[in-house]
Amino acid sequence: MQVIIGQAAVQRCNATVDFLEEWEPFNPPTVNNGDLHDHFVNIAVNMLGIDKVGVLTPSMGAEDFSFYQEVIPGYFFSIGVQNASHKPSEALLHSPYLKINEEGLPYGAALHASLAASYLLKHQQDIGAGGIGALAAGCKGK
């Protein structure tokens, strides 16, 4: 806490630290929106093939993404890549020792881009007069 306040002072700013002790420190559950699930499955299956799209077993792990889902509908998914020539990493997801199979990155980027572009095309009438730029700036559609 002293470090944060001190660093802010160096920049001629003020900082406060609130550990939210009176607030429950638990993340809400991450619950995917059903319509967005259908959208994801449609795009992912068409792009990758039905044999490459699966459903994860529900987990009791916490995810910060759930706070967004309290405000707007959301869809959280994982991209996994198997490669027989790579030994699976034993490090956890947020570990600096995690090793990923980078051959999957173009697939993940293409899937994200396809999901966003197809969603915007499908729902452009919901965006209103502000256009896609307004949606990107934080305006909500339906």
Image: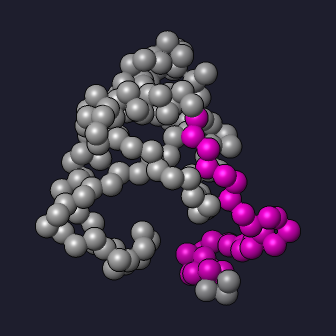
- On screen, residue 128 versus residue 16, left or right, reads left
> Which quarter of the image is occupied by the N terminus?
bottom right
Nearer-the-camera pick, 48 or 76: 48
Residue displayed at 52% across by 19% down = 127
List x then y, in percent, for residue 7: 57, 81
Quick check: is 23 in the magenta stretch?
yes
Does 2 sit above or below residue 99? below
Does 11 sit above or below residue 40? below
List x then y, in percent, for residue 65: 57, 52
Residue displayed at 56% across by 53% down = 58
**Residue 109 visible somewhere in the drawing:** no
Main SS of the magenta part reads loop
Please provide the residue range marked out in magenta. 4-33
Residue displayed at 62% across by 61% down = 60
List x then y, in percent, for residue 92: 42, 74
Quick check: is 8 in the magenta stretch?
yes
Residue 99: which quarter of the image?
Answer: bottom left
